[in-house]
Image: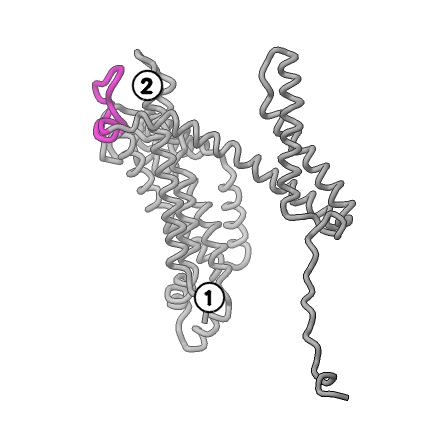
Amino acid sequence: MTLTDLTPAPSAVVLSPPTRLTSGRLPEWSPWALLGLSLAISFAVFTLLGATAGEGPNVVGATVIGVLLYLVLITVISGVVEGRRKATDRLVTGLVTSAFAIALVPLISVGFTVISNGVAGLTAEFFSSSMRNVVGEGGGALHAIMGTVLITLAAAVISIPIGLFTAIYLIEYGRGPLARGITFLVDVMTGIPSIVAGLFIYALFALLLGPGVRMGIMGALSLAVLMIPVVVRSSEEMLRLVPNELREASYALGVPKWLTILKVVLPTSIAGITTGIMLAIARVIGETAPLLITAGFTASMNYNLTDGRMMTLPVFVYTQYMNQGLPAEAYVNRAWAAALVLILIVMLLNLVARLIAKFFAPATSR
């Protein structure tokens, strides 16, 4: 036996063969290729049908048929190559992705329509003037923007403390029939139509101040009625997520319950609570029916919530579109511009909520 015989042979490098259709796994590009092939076949068929009828291809129909054809092809081919379980997984993945795409269609459509029609009306005059003594072209929505800000701010000031304290009571103190009754009423209030809230506030003030009264504070109260259940529900869920170990550790150190809630429970859940509050504000800021009944509409600036009517952006959009004058294009352009401003305000609120949730969330790493 020589030294050469004792020397181990170098290990051979085994190269994995490329993925093939017969290896039990489809290539990564196969779903996209099948989707493109299905859409191409579908659009070709619909183009021929449209040419026969003297019309263009039905884009929506061709897309739907193409997606259905893709789901059939990917399921059958995956079942032959990869097996039944993988084929079922690919089918469910295709269905979920299709549902997501369908949900995006109205969102993208609304966003594109509002931006394309409203961006032309965003001028300096639109943000710096009201509609007082304006007939036809010109004017702006400064009075509506200020009214929306003031009424929404007042509604938030009213509803946030009530909703937050109610949630704290239900989670930390509430037991028995009273807590169950409050929970039931909150659930009922969550589902009431917005017009009912407006009618309730209008009837209340009509009994106190007489019929026909309309003020900004009435609109704020109607929005607060809609905001309170949302704030209660979101804050309640966030407080419920706080671990009981944190409360017990605070109690073990002799800290009273109210101080534990203030120093331990609320700081731990502040990010989620703030996000819920911002979403509640975004939910009511676009309400039209209760504000049309309670706050009314006006063409002049009004900074006083307790004196006279007050215009808001949703009501401004409604009045500009429904009460068109000459030229009608000017009224429609102002309506689209106000709708775009309202969407931008809601988007800004959602971005603020996400930033607050990101920066104020408690650290999870040790």
- Please determine whether, in this image, residue 95 is positioned above or below residue 179: above
Disc 2 marks which amino acid? Tyr
Q: Which residue is found at the position 38% from the left and 59% from the top? A: 360
Asked if residue 125 is among those painted magenta in the image, a careful observer would answer yes
Which secondary structure type mostly characterizes the magenta part of the structure?
loop
Residue 335 seen by the camera: yes
Residue marked by disc 2 = 331
- Which one is nearer the viewer's eye here, 62 or 155? 62
Where is mark 1, residue-wise?
A: 364
Q: In the rendered view, how is the structure colored? A: one colour
SS for tag 2? Answer: helix
Q: Nearer the viewer, residue 68 or 133?
A: 68
Sequence-wise first label, 2 or 1: 2
Which span is picked out in magenta?
A: 124-141
Q: Tell me, yes or no, whether the two marked residues, 2 and 1, touch with CB atoms within 8 Å.
A: no
Q: Residue at x 42, y 30 (%)?
A: 199
Visible residue check, residue 206: no
Position above or below: 183 against 55 = below
